[in-house]
Image (cartoon, coloured by chain):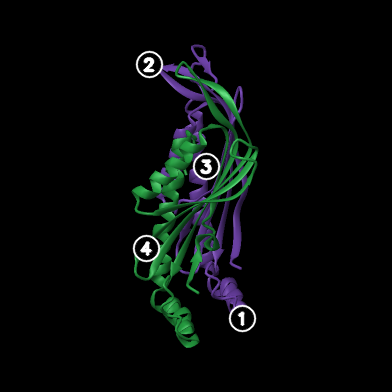
Chain colours: A green, B purple
Amino acid sequence: MSAGGNLSDLNYDSDLNYKGYFDFQEILRFMKKWMEDRDLSFYERRVNVKGDLKGNRYKIKLEGDKRINPYVKWYLIVEIFGFDIDQREVVEKGKKVKKDYGRLKFIFDGKIILDPDNQWESSEFMEKLRDKFFHGKVVKWDNDMVWSDELYYLMYALKEDFSRYLGMYCLG
Amino acid sequence: MAEKHTIIAGDKVSYYGLFELKELFSLINSYFKQVGYDKRVITNSQQVFDNHKSVFVEFRPWKTLTDYVQFEIKLKISAEFEDVEIRVDDIPKIVQKGEVSCQFFAAVKTDYEKSWEQKAEYFFLRTLFNKFVYKTKMTEWDGMLKQQTAHLKAEISSFLNMNRFTEEHKHRNLIK
């Protein structure tokens, strides 16, 4: 199994809570475009839906991944929880439109996968050599300072851009 | 587990009146950037009600001094307000009117990489070092963090006080 780690293990995960009007399809489109603009492959995994999207509660997981070099792969994970969602009519620019209203919670997390192709798993000895020596000594600085840091700031940029898109007062 | 030495626990700044929330957050971010802290926002909550809005944000930036010591500041900001329009030099400007409160916590973390707690002997050595060898350094670090947090508190207080005497009589409520 590939080695690596979650940014949440380093206390880097954070959440965004929003209660108000939003357009859920536009949110998904925004996330997709944001990830694709940064060469991340986008996946939408609908994990748990009670009723359909017009129902009350749902949980959706969005993932983006990117191979930054032959040994390292990034995963950006956004979990969206929706509560008390219903449709309401609002007046926008003089026209009546229907928008979703409810509570949304976004959890942002990241994961680094080292050796995603399991090239060092031909034997137990190679696996231990990889984990203890290669990851523990040779690439430790690159993992902690370069790859994790870059992924963390990429995740932060996503949070900032998304807060700006929702019209929140605090970005990030 | 890393050792946390709390320097400031729960100092508060409260304000009621006109303020600019986005500028306040911008001020906080630029202060942390200036003193070399890494950005981290743990929680960012915003609720839109019929006649007011509510925002709660928790910042928890950190600064790594050495491979053994890290500073951590926790800043909790909560605000209940409505958007209003005021006139500044005859130019309309949208600001927030309501209450905002900021709570400060600051701590020095030692052995944040958890290298000295894998065995009981290491833990014992670490305790001895912290108490006797690093005693002066620890006092110095405590002082540095206290000064940085006090400076941040002063910046936020003076920023909020800037609008204390802004004329309110020519405004209209913007309720979204």
* Quadrant for the N terminus of chain B in the image: bottom right
The alpha-carbon separation of the residues under discs 1 and 2 comes to: 67 Å
The reply to the same-chain question for discs 3 and 2 is yes
Q: Foreground mark, 4 or 2?
A: 4
The alpha-carbon separation of the residues under discs 4 and 2 comes to: 53 Å
Which badge, 3 or 1, comes first in the chain's sequence? 1
Q: Are marks 3 and 1 in contact (CB under 8 Å)?
A: no
The reply to the same-chain question for discs 3 and 4 is no
Hey, what amino acid is under mark 3? Lys
State which quadrant residue A93 falls in. top left
Q: Is residue A100 visible?
A: yes
**Which residue is label 2 attached to?**
B89
The reply to the same-chain question for discs 1 and 2 is yes
In this rendering, position of residue B82 left or right of residue A146: right
User: Label 4: chain?
Assistant: A
The alpha-carbon separation of the residues under discs 3 and 2 comes to: 29 Å
Q: Are marks 3 and 2 in contact (CB under 8 Å)?
A: no
In this rendering, position of residue A84 left or right of residue A115: right
Q: Foreground mark, 3 or 2?
A: 2
State which quadrant residue B102 falls in. top right
Percent across and percent down for residue B115 are: 54, 75
User: Label 2: chain?
Assistant: B
